[in-house]
Image (cartoon, grey):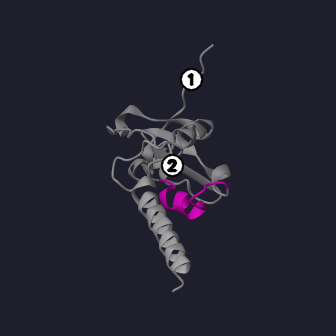
Amino acid sequence: MATETKLFTREEVKSKNDSKTAWIIIHNSVYNVTDFLNEHPGGEEVLLEQAGKDGTEAFEDVGHSSDARDMMKKYKIGELVEADRIETQEKPSVNWASDNNDNNGSSWKSWIIPVALGVVATIIYRFYFLAQGH
């Protein structure tokens, strides 16, 4: 038996904006994140800043992982009424464990390999000079 989805207006969500009751809208879904405030890896301030508002853009800008997106499901309490919905686009989730995250060149590979080569070159250089007696 399917359960009926609870519907909320943006006005209802707007009043849920403190550490006692923190609701956030993400992709037209309403989440009660009150119990998650102390567990949020980015700190409770990040969630409280978006509490009572539509946090879709902030959520997507951070690039949450698929695990984070799965975790959200237990905090979902409903959806916005049709009249309050806006079109949103979900970005692909980030797989932090993947080595294939080279999209913007800022992955660990872009700096770890040159650093490792520099360390190896320094060690070889020092051993060479120590062997020469300098």
Mark 1, residue position: 4
- Give above or below for 69 relative to 2: below
Drawn side of residue 84 relative to residue 75, left or right = left
Magenta region: which residues? 39-52
* Towards the viewer: 37 or 60: 60
Q: Residue at x 55, y 49 (%)?
A: 23
Query: For numbered disc 1, what is the local secondary structure?
Result: loop
Drawn side of residue 105 relative to residue 30, left or right = left
* Towards the viewer: 67 or 84: 67
Q: Residue at x 52, y 54 (%)?
A: 15
Callout 1 crowding tier (Cα within 10 Å): few <14, some 14–19, many ≥20: few
Query: For numbered disc 2, what is the local secondary structure?
Result: strand
What type is the residue that disc 2 sits on? Answer: Ile
Mark 2, residue position: 24
Disc number for residue 17: none
Q: Horizontal and vertical percent for residue 101?
A: 42, 45
Farthest residue, direction front? 132
Q: Residue at x 57, y 40 (%)?
A: 67
